[in-house]
Amino acid sequence: MINITITTNEGVKKQVNIRKTLSGDYILREHPEIDIFVIPTKQKVLALPKDEQTDNVYSLQERLFDYLSKKGVVLPETVIGGNIYGSLQAGYAAQPPGGEDPLQVVIYSIANFIEDEMPKYNFEKSYEDRMEKSLLDPDIQNSTELGEVPQEPFKGSIPKYGFPTRGIYRYNY
């Protein structure tokens, strides 16, 4: 794992935890649902789901590339589905006209996106955890002991011994 410090023209510094592969690609694994690959040799950004492809993961990938497109990091016309199941990818310019290092711009923008997404993800995760806890371990007010609910002789809309079959298959005039 590599810690990269990126400094912008305004003097803003950002620490990014990133991994470098043997082929020279960079992987940002900080987001809990997707892994983001930056492939400098092909000028591509690739987003893969960590566990399984769901609607939530696809919308997250879509938000990532919308964010990068609106910031001018990736070329909007290059956002396509990748050759790996459940992946989206986009290309970025090899050398921006301003002379910035494109790799630093891409990594900085992705780190900003992940930083913006984490409060939303943490809120959703804590909500799911609270709901699961309330269902699996309810408090005294929301639970009953076995045998507290009185029995009734007939419950529901389906009779105990089924419906009478007399006249079901007959047509009435």
Image (cartoon, rainbow, N blue to C red):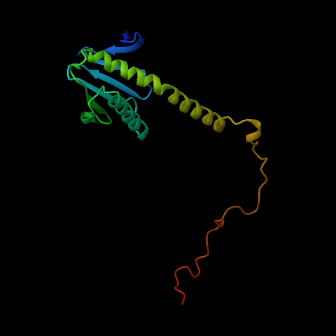
Place of residue 5 in the rendered image (x, y in percent of width and height, measured from the top left)? 38, 9
Residue 44 point in image, percent of width and height: 25, 25
Left of 147 or right of it: where is 32? left
Residue 24 can be seen in this image: yes
Q: Judge left or right: residue 169 versus residue 147.
A: left
| Residue displayed at 31% across by 15% down | 104
Quadrant of residue 30 within the rendered picture: top left
Determine whether 72 is above or below 134 in the image.
above
**Residue drawn at the location 27% of the way across and 15% of the way down:** 100
Q: In which quarter of the image is residue 70?
A: top left
Camera-side residue: 96 or 45? 96
Q: Position of residue 49 (x, y in %)?
A: 37, 31
In this view, the residue in front, 121 or 149, is 121
The reply, left or right, for residue 155 in relation to residue 108 is right
Q: In which quarter of the image is the C terminus?
A: bottom right
At 61% from the left and 72% from the top, the residue drawn is 163
- The tally of labels here is 0
For the residue pair 7 and 117, the one nearer the viewer reads as 7
Q: Foreground residue, 105 or 128? A: 105
Q: Where is residue 6 in the image (x, y as percent from the top left)?
A: 37, 11
Residue 1 visible to the viewer: no
Q: Looking at this rendering, what residue extends furthest in the bottom direction?
A: 173
- Rendered view: 113 above or below 23: below
Q: In which quarter of the image is the N terminus?
A: top left
Q: Is residue 157 above or below residue 63?
A: below
Q: Which residue is drawn at 32% across and 18% down?
A: 105
